[in-house]
Amino acid sequence: MAMLFNPFKMPKPRPFNYMPLYYDERKEQLEKLKEAAAADKSKPRVNLQKGFLHDQRARNKSQLEKGSVIRWGVIIAAAIAGFMILLPRIDKFVMLLAK
């Protein structure tokens, strides 16, 4: 005699079976090429692009640092010039406040 309801036995969850709505042939070909390249790792290859990009990033970093130094120099020069221009007026303003 089979029982229809057993409070101690949990039912199994329904399996997840997702079917994609579209087929991307280009992606499939790309995955096949990646698998073929991964299988062909026995040959040593020189990665010129990686070395080129590393050199390019190093050059860009040095140019950015150079620009940063110049930028800070301009900011400090502007602050000193502004202070020198406003110094006599600040002195007069302080004298007015002291009266």
Image (cartoon, rainbow, N blue to C red):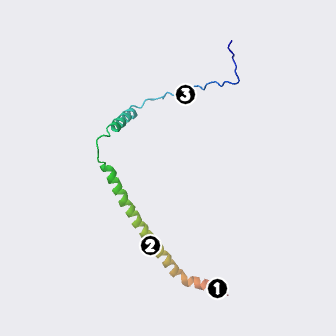
Residue at 52% x, 79% y: name it: 83
Q: Which mark is residue 16?
A: 3
Compared with residue 42, is residue 55 higher up or lower down, i.e. above or below? below
Q: Which mark is residue 96?
A: 1
Q: In terms of secondary structure, where does tag 1 sit?
A: helix
Q: Quadrant of residue 62?
A: bottom left
Graded by Cα atoms within 10 Å as few (under 14), some (14 to 19) or many (20 or more), the crowding at tag 3 reads few
Q: Quadrant of residue 13?
A: top right
Q: Is residue 87 left or right of residue 99?
A: left
- From the image, tell me which residue sits under label 2: 73
Going from the N terminus, do you reach mark 1 or mark 2 first? Answer: 2
Residue at 48% x, 74% y: name it: 76
Q: Position of residue 74 (x, y in %)?
A: 44, 72
Q: Is the C-beta separation of discs 3 and 2 under 8 Å? A: no
Q: In terms of secondary structure, where does tag 3 sit?
A: loop
Quarter of the rendering occupied by the C terminus: bottom right
Q: CA distance from mark 1 to mark 2?
A: 34 Å
Q: Position of residue 80 (x, y in %)?
A: 49, 78
Badge nearest the viewer, 1 or 2: 2
